[in-house]
Image (tube, rainbow, N blue to C red):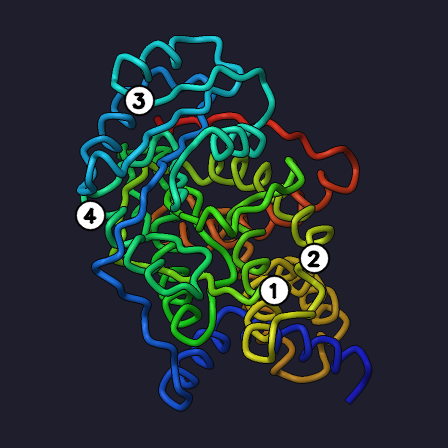
Amino acid sequence: MTVVAVIFWAAVGLLLYTQLGYPALLAVLARLVSARSAPDAPGFEPSVAVIVAAHNEESVIGAKVANALALDWPRERLQVLVAADGCTDATVARAREAGADLVLELGRVGKIPALDAGVAASRGELIVFSDANVALEPGAIAQLARAFGDPAVGYACGQVVFHQAGAGPGADNQEGLYWRYEMAVRTLESRLASVTAGNGGLHAVRRSAYVVIDPRMDHDIYFPFQMVKRGLRAVYVPQARATEKMVPSIEGEFARKRRFMTHVWITVLRGGMLSPRGYGLRYGLMILSHRVLRYSAWALHLVALVTNAFLLGRGLVYDATFAVQVTLYVTAALGRVRPFLIARYYVTMNASIALGLWDYLRAPTPTHWETAEGTR
């Protein structure tokens, strides 16, 4: 076997393992090894602060505050706080009118500094973060709190169900399908060790475990692995549910994810994720499989395609694998019709990861964020 063939099969093998083999491995391990029981302490009722960072969210902030105030949690133990990040519309006024306990009027500091300010001003033992366009189910906080009844848990994320608000041409985002796959994987990770990423729509941290991070980084990616390094668990609580309106189109999702990935890449490359210190063998394998290899899939696809081109004519197997790869990209390009949308979504999202890395390398990562079009 030539060197080119070895490189080709290594790239193909890693791609298959990352997308299919890793979830299968988790499922097998969950049956063979002693999985950790889900934390569950129904009598644990800490004081809770729900913090929403908002930039020009006048269209949804009133409903968000009302939703938070209606949660099934003792009112005397619940604080709803809005950190208004340089709002130039009526966000502040509408948050106050809706009954928010505290509204911070900040300059345009960025999402992470706004959340830092919210945490500093809050009084909850448990800090819950949720986006302005996310609707929490009444029992969401109670379900998260039960997980924190285990003192070893420092971080928990809930289940956010994405729904397509529109229909017809342009409403073709497949993010909901991806998240169903992702949540199945996180369920297994949580049982075996800890999750490798959270969800900004609904996640929580114990106040004593909260850390102030680089404002260009992202809590969803940074907190889980850092909790593990500090001897704590980061868990997934599927019973804590919320819904969110997703970007209508794949193109819109591509733009959103490309921006998001600039924050992810700085978290991965400069936040300590790549250092195995403090992980343990099981969690280290999860980080390698679900984060490092997943974020490298675009490069593996490129290597597989180029090396396969050099191997054409050296056997039917190489002609067939090349045809499969070309078919993937052709169907992605034609992905305006239903059968091809999954291919289009898959290729486009991998491209967003690569271009997010390019954006991170060529220019400073901004601290601020913009609302994704069509999600309000």
- The structure residue drawn at horizontal position 55% and vertical position 78%, both measured from the top left corner, is 282
Reading the image, the residue beneath label 1 is 229
As measured in the structure, the alpha-carbon distance from the residue carrying label 2 to the one carrying label 4 is 34 Å
Q: Are marks 1 and 2 in contact (CB under 8 Å)?
A: yes
The answer to whether 30 appears left or right of 240 in the picture is: right
The answer to whether 150 appears left or right of 17 in the picture is: left
Question: In the displayed structure, would residue 101 be above or below residue 323?
Answer: above
Relative image position of residue 290 (x, y in whole percent): 54, 66
Dot 2 alpha-carbon crowd within 10 angstroms: few under 14, some 14 to 19, many 20 or more: some
Reading the image, the residue beneath label 4 is 139
Q: Which callout, 2 or 4, points at the residue further toward the start of the chain? A: 4
As measured in the structure, the alpha-carbon distance from the residue carrying label 3 to the one carrying label 1 is 35 Å
The residue under label 1 is which amino acid type?
Lys
As measured in the structure, the alpha-carbon distance from the residue carrying label 1 to the one carrying label 2 is 10 Å
The residue under label 3 is which amino acid type?
Ala
Question: In the displayed structure, would residue 32 be above or below residue 102?
Answer: below
| Rendering quarter of residue 111 | top right
The residue under label 4 is which amino acid type?
Gly
Report helix, strand or loop for mark 1. Answer: helix
